[in-house]
Amino acid sequence: MEYIFARSLDEAKEYLQKEDAVLVFFSDESCNVGDALSPKLQNLLKTDFPKMNFLEINVQMLPEARGYFNIYVIPSVLAYFGGKESIREARHISVPVVGKKIERIYRIMFD
């Protein structure tokens, strides 16, 4: 698992196109839930989905990302497989539920 913090929208878009599997985490400075959730999601990837990377986008630093990715609620999580959005979770995010959704697609791609 590789952790990337996007510095521009173009960097994020390019990364999503070149990597096979990416979990995108949308955060901002005012979200305490996101501060607790991010390490849990990163740990999930490290332990269960090591070929999937973690991309964090701070929507206060990159406000244009909200419109591009249709993000209305923070925190939000999108999973991309093969450059295409496959999973979307927002607001009340359960790490086990996200893990089960990822597992189905991940096993098809990597097993």
Image (spheres, grey):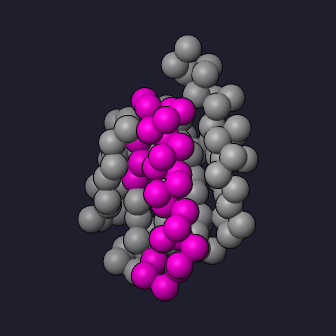
Left or right: 14 as drawn, with respect to 22: left
Horizontally, residue 107 falls left or right of residue 12, namely right
Q: The C terminus appears in which quarter of the rendering?
A: top right
Q: Is residue 17 visible?
A: no
Vertical arrangement, residue 111 with respect to residue 6, above or below = above
Q: As rendered, which of 10 and 108 lies closer to the eye?
A: 108
The location of residue 31, given as percent across then percent down, is: 53, 79
| Image quarter in which the N terminus is found | top left
Q: Position of residue 22 (x, y in %)?
A: 46, 42
Above or below 16: residue 20:
above
Q: Position of residue 40 (x, y in %)?
A: 53, 54
Q: Residue at x 43, y 30 (%)?
A: 51
Which residue occupies 63% across, 74% down? 73
Residue 17 percent location from the top left of the image = 39, 40
Q: Residue at x 46, y 57 (%)?
A: 39
Answer left or right for 79 relative to 17: right
Which residue range is magenta in the image? 28-55
Is 97 inside the magenta-drawn segment?
no
Report the residue at 53% width, 43% height from top. Answer: 44
Can residue 99 be seen at all in this image of the molecule? yes
In the depicted structure, whether residue 45 falls above or below residue 36: above
- The answer to whether residue 74 is above or below residue 104 is below
Q: Quadrant of residue 94?
A: bottom right
Residue 76 image-quadrant placement: bottom right
Q: Secondary structure of the magenta portion, mostly?
A: helix
Tally of numbered tags: 0
